[in-house]
Amino acid sequence: MFVLKKADPPLRRRTVDKYSVEFIERVPCGNEIASFRFSRPDGYDFVAGQHLILGVQTADGPERKPFTHSSAPDDGYLEITTRLSGSAFKNALLGLAPGDLVEVGGPAGRLMLPPDTRCIRFLVGGVGITPARSMLRDAVYRDWSWDDAVLFYGNRDPSCMPFIDEFEAMRNRGVSVVSVVEHPDATWRGPVGFITADLVREHVDPADGIYLASGPPVMVTAMERVLDDLGIPDERRMIERFGPA
Ligand SMILES: Cc1cc2nc3c(=O)[nH]c(=O)nc-3n(C[C@H](O)[C@H](O)[C@H](O)COP(=O)(O)OP(=O)(O)OC[C@H]3O[C@@H](n4cnc5c(N)ncnc54)[C@H](O)[C@@H]3O)c2cc1C
């Protein structure tokens, strides 16, 4: 399992700081997923892969939930990306108007790449893309070229694959994308179904690289089975579950 050195600054905090931030805008991806952007408070620094705790007033009262930053540490705003599930929390997000204040706590979490990572494979689906997006975008800011970064990216259908154009445009930095959809449309020419060990083997040699799986627990459990099939040892796995197993 990936171990972080004790001296790394974000982990020295015992409690997360809280900030009042302004909602800026919503960026939809199809009908089901959207990104929400907020102002970035002075002094709020995070490492790609970490999450924040978002607090909003819902119809059922105040609620707080964790969300991985989908923006990069150098972006001038904070962004999260989520499925619009119809819950009171998500409905409250949908009801925000520009300038409305919400609470952000953070940064939190230990999911972060070792600084010298050159070879990475992301096994992610849907909103599980958030840490990968932050890390890949961060690499662009840092003018970093990967030896080999492969994004195995599962989505329900081709109409909503968050940030796909941005990832495709990173090809010249050593990023390649293998998109898989569950429900193809008539134009889809790529793989159909889910990310499998066979699909991964078709594109990369499992002997190399770090494997990062993130997203809703069901998806991560499925990806851990894929990692087992591929024989990936714990020290080359990075796992982030978006909820209890
Ligand atoms: C470290 C961390 C990072 C996270 N990052 C993100 C992120 O980047 N984007 C994001 O959308 N969510 C993220 N989450 C999950 C997030 O906090 C919410 O739990 C999730 O979005 C579901 O909230 P909801 O209001 O839609 O559903 P709720 O009303 O809280 O859940 C209703 C039920 O729906 C199911 N469910 C629906 N969606 C999810 C989900 N995504 N994960 C688990 N169960 C689910 C569960 O069974 C749950 O009990 C993260 C969680 C953690 C712990």
Image (tube, rainbow, N blue to C red):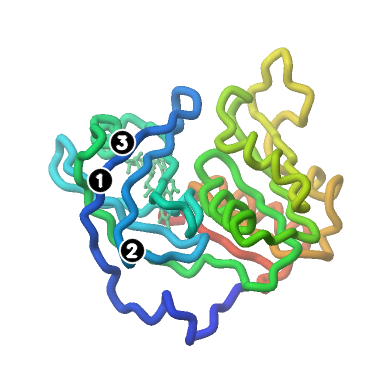
Please report whichever mark, 2 or 1, sits nearer to the chain's N-terminal start.
1
Which quarter of the frame holds ligand 1? top left
Query: What residue does disc 2 label?
Result: 106
Q: Residues within 10 Å of mark 2 (few under 14, many from 20)?
A: many
Q: Circle 3 sits in a helix, a strand or a loop, which is it?
A: helix
The amino acid sitting under disc 3 is Lys
Quadrant in the picture for the N terminus: bottom right
Q: Residue furthest top?
A: 186
Q: Nearer the viewer, residue 96 or 42?
A: 42
Q: Circle 2 sits in a helix, a strand or a loop, which is it?
A: strand
The amino acid sitting under disc 1 is Glu
| Residue in view at x 74 percent, y 54 percent | 149
Q: Is mark 3 within 8 Å of ligand 1?
A: yes
Please report whichever mark, 1 or 3, sits nearer to the chain's N-terminal start.
1
The amino acid sitting under disc 2 is Gly
What is the CA distance from the residue labelled 1 to the residue labelled 3?
17 Å
